[in-house]
Amino acid sequence: MTELKPRNHSRGEGGTIAYRKVPGKLPGIVFCTGYRSNMNGTKALAVESFCRTQGRAFVRFDYRGHGESSGTFELLTLSDWIDDAVTVIDDLTDGPQILIGSSMGGWIMVRAALQRPRRIAGLVGIAAAADFTEDLMWQWFPHAVKEAITRDGLWRGADPGENGILTVITRALIDDGRANLVLRDTIPLDVPVRLLHGMQDQNVPWSQSQKLLERLRSADVSLTLVKAGGHRMSAPGELALLLRTVDDLCRQIETAAPA
C-alpha cells in the first residue's frame, strides 16, 4: 500500500492517505470519492482503466478515515478531507489537473480547486453533493436526531439513504460543513465544469447539481441529467457517459493549452 502524509495536521488526528498513482500525459486526473466510499469503487477504477489506455496521469486515493487510509472516521470532518485532496494535488501531481468528484467528492473538488486555482484545469461532478451536511443532512434530520447531535456531540443510527447502514454523524461534521458551504454565493472558478446526475437519485437530488451550475462563475458549465439514473451512476451506460465526458474535457483542455 502506498501512503502519503497530509500537509495540515491542525485538525483531526493526523494519519496517512492511501493512494494509487498512474504516470502519464497531462492534463492528469484526480478522483475524489464520496462520503464513506473508497478508491476501489467502480467509477474510480473505470476512469483509471481509461487513463491507462490513453497514457494519461491518474491518481485515486482514500480520505483519512475511509478505505485503506488510517484515521478514525468520526474524528474527522470535511476540512480534513479537503486537506487530503489538496495534499494529493500538491505532492502527487504536476501540471494541470482535472478533478472528478463523486457525491461528497463533488463538494471537495470545488473546495480543493478554490485552494489551487492555478493547478486545476477542469472539474467533473458525478451526483455532486455540495453543502450536503447542511442541505441534505441537517435540514432533513428529525428533531430527535438534531437534539442528540446538539446535546451529545454525535448521533449513531441507520442511514436510510444508504440502505440502513449504521453510521455516525458528529456535531463537528455539521459545524465544519457550515464553514465550507459553497452554494450560498458565487463560486469564483472559471474552468470548464461538467456535471452528471441521475434523476432517480434518492440520496442527492439533482437540484443540488443545478444549484452548483448556477453558482459557478464559469460560463463553460453543463449539467447532463440521466432520466433513469440513480445515485451511484455506475451502470454500463452511465460509466460510458462518464468516460466520454472526461475524454471530451481532456481534448478541450489539450486544444486550449498554449503550444
Image (cartoon, rainbow, N blue to C red):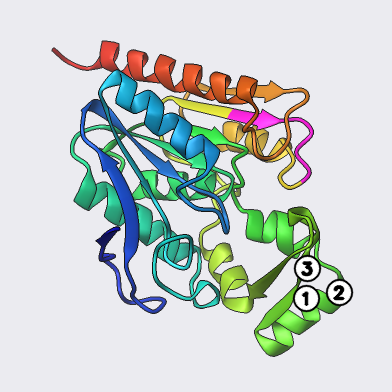
Q: Amino acid at mark 3?
A: Ala
Q: Amino acid at mark 2?
A: His
Task: Measure the alpha-carbon separation of dots 3 and 2.
Answer: 16 Å
Name the residue at the front extreme: 1
Q: Which numbered mark, 3 or 1, is in the foreground of this view?
A: 3
Q: Is residue 255 magenta?
A: no
Tell me if I can see residue 190 in this picture: no
Residue that label 2 marks: 143
The quadrant of the image that shows the N terminus is bottom left
Q: Say left or right for 156 vs 222.
A: right
Residue that label 3 marks: 158
Seen in the picture, residue 96 relative to 70 is either above or below; the reply is: above
Disc 2 residue crowd, few under 14, some 14–19, many 20+, Cα 10 Å: few
Task: Measure the alpha-carbon separation of dots 3 and 1.
Answer: 15 Å
Magenta segment range?
Answer: 196-202
Residue that label 1 marks: 146
CB-based contact (under 8 Å), mark 2 and mark 1: yes
Q: Label 3: state its secondary structure.
A: strand
Task: Measure the alpha-carbon separation of dots 2 and 1.
Answer: 5 Å
The quadrant of the image that shows the C terminus is top left
Disc 3 residue crowd, few under 14, some 14–19, many 20+, Cα 10 Å: few
Which callout, 3 or 2, points at the residue further toward the start of the chain?
2
